[in-house]
Image (cartoon, grey):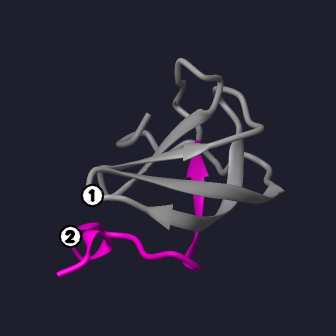
Amino acid sequence: MNESEAAPVKPGETYEVSINAVGEKGDGIARVRGFVLFVPGVKKGDYVKIKISKVLKNVGFAEVLEKLERPPQDSKYA
């Protein structure tokens, strides 16, 4: 079993995510199904379309495809 089989995302997949934090090295942090993804070149509060570039056992890395307009707030997730 390789490392990416345990993760809920795979390299090449795309997602629309909110950046909810910034890590020690300045990369944005997003989550997909609870899985942590590091995204360079973004800031907290950004809403972006990303492409998964690398997946490790506990974290993944993604690149920004485009910055998006923030979707309407849904009260059950706010």
Judge whether residue 8 is colored magenta. yes
Magenta range is 1-18
**Which numbered marker is on residue 57?**
1
Crowding near the residue tagged with mark 2, few <14, some 14–19, many ≥20 C-alpha atoms within 10 Å: few
Foreground residue among 69 and 25: 25
Task: Tell me whether the residue at label 2 lies in contact with that at label 1, contact meaning CB atoms closer than 8 angstroms.
Answer: yes
Circle 2 — which element?
A: helix
Q: Which residue is mark 2?
A: 6
Circle 1 — which element?
A: loop
Foreground residue among 10 and 57: 57
Three-letter residue code for mark 2: Ala
Which residue is painted at 43% across and 39% down in the image?
Answer: 75
Quadrant of the image for the N terminus?
A: bottom left
From this view, report whether residue 10 is shown above or below residue 60: below
**Which numbered marker is on residue 20?**
none
Which quadrant would residue 60 be assigned to in this image?
bottom left
Crowding near the residue tagged with mark 1, few <14, some 14–19, many ≥20 C-alpha atoms within 10 Å: few
